[in-house]
Image: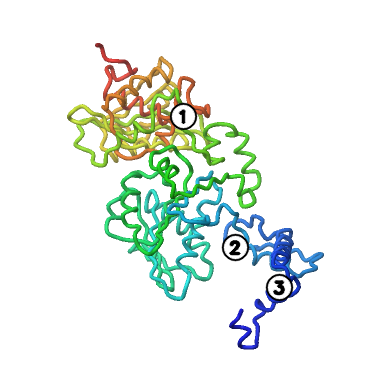
Amino acid sequence: MREGINRNRLTPAEAEIISVLQQHEDKMAAIGELRLRKNSAISAGAFCHQGPLGASKPPEPVMENDRDGWKCHAPRLQRGWFLTARSEQRPPAGDWRTWLVMGGRGSGKTRAGAEWVHALASAGERSDLRIALVAETLGDAREVMIDGVSGICRIARKNCPDFEISRRRLVWRNGAVAQIFSSEDPEALRGPQFHYAWCDEIGKWKHAEETFDMLQFGLRLGRDPRQLVTTTPRPVPVLKRLIADPSTRLVRIATGDNRQNLAPGFIEALERRYGGTRLGRQELAGELIEDREDALWRRSEIETCVIRVVPALRRIVVAVDPPSGIGQNSCCGIVVAGLEQEGRAVVLADCSVEGATPAQWAQGVVKAYRRFAADRIVAEVNQGGEMVTAMLRSVDVALPITMVRATRGKFLRAEPVAALYEQGRVAHAGRFVELEDQMCDFGPDGLSSGRSPDRLDALVWALTALMLEGQGEPRVRGI
């Protein structure tokens, strides 16, 4: 503004600011006037949900009773993050090393991360900033953090960075660079160094400890290196340590806080189904829910059994727990496990499919069987009987299938398998988030949500076939 006064000619924006300040000698009064004008724009629909970016029909501004002439700018103000951002989506004040945003699904975590990174990278005509973008997989980094609806390239507006896919990096016009990394390859973070970092969904990273540790060693440029962690809460060790760290600023946001940007009825529909449940408190309210006291597994125990290198296996099975019905909420549990030469079992993959038809989940089973060159398919037939075998053989008539039928309750069948974990006789070849959630939420009365533990059932059948006697019902070996 001073530059404008010196040249004896003000830009329209400068003139408008000076006009407001002259009308209100008290600075607080001037700020209040600006807020009133912003609220006038809100009433015109400036911050209502406008659908996906690039919608063909933009909203029409409300012109009636537009005394101040601000309502016609409502669509433009919609794009102003400085006006639309909620307080919890803005960087906290003071000294901090980690800004931890724990929130429910669709609560605005990704938008906060994308805006923070873009604001840092696009500041100044020249910049040598180096930023790390770390996600569970490289695909997640691209589809969520960069190209997603709230990703960097979607919110960057005119100053959109170039995405150099082959080099896995974003490059801004001023020279700032953001590199993408995956929790599947912690060693990729050995060598590069950064001023800032954005970690997304750390609660479900495959090798969370190693990846986060490697990032900390590289976060060493500039006077004040900082990192933003956005995640749906899960009681994993790395997240618990971040919360306890005095240099962390924790912000909690709920899905309902972002109601104006979500589909009408979305919040109400989820509240009716999951309100008050452990799953709802975690996925909607953004609460960190600890393991159930009466659960058969603990996350700390599962964490210790994760391995990165799978040795030679002498037998591999694919276990199937077919759903009892068809629909969006149905899930076919498909778990692949193998047996080492020394007798330890290794859970290789959770290939479960949700909302699939019988033909689709049968295809998923056969795909897992061929991918891991399995020796046998173990299928529970309580729900579908001969139909289960018929569906599988309709895809491949030569499949070796063992049919198993449950005659005892799920908890009783799972207890001997949980004992194998306690004895250190089971390892996991990676992190299987949805499966682990069921394991740590499974008690005598089932899952706290009341849903069927399809993934866990498949795990029980796979380890029963490999480790316990009889190839059928789990039972403790004789002493």
The residue at which mark 1 appears reads as 323
Q: Mark 2, mark 3: which one is toward the viewer?
A: 3
Query: Could you tell me how far apart the alpha carbons at marks 1 and 3 are, in whole angstroms?
Result: 66 Å
On the image, the x and y values in percent for residue 330 come to 50, 33
Query: Amino acid under label 1?
Result: Pro
Q: Earlier in the sequence, mark 2 or mark 3?
A: 3
Residue depicted at x 30% and y 37%: 306
Which colouring convention does the figure follow?
rainbow
Instruction: Judge from the rendering whether residue 301 lies leftward or rightward of residue 69; answer left or right.
Output: left
Query: Amino acid under label 2?
Result: Phe
Instruction: Name the element at disc 2.
Output: helix
Vertical placement of residue 38 versus 231, above or below: below
The residue at which mark 3 appears reads as 21
| CB under 8 Å between discs 2 and 1 | no
Vertical placement of residue 145 versus 409, above or below: below
Q: Quadrant of the N terminus?
A: bottom right
Per the rendering, the mark at residue 82 is: 2
Query: Could you tell me how far apart the alpha carbons at marks 2 and 1 are, in whole angstroms?
Result: 47 Å
Instruction: Judge from the rendering whether residue 289 lies leftward or rightward of residue 74; answer left or right.
Output: left
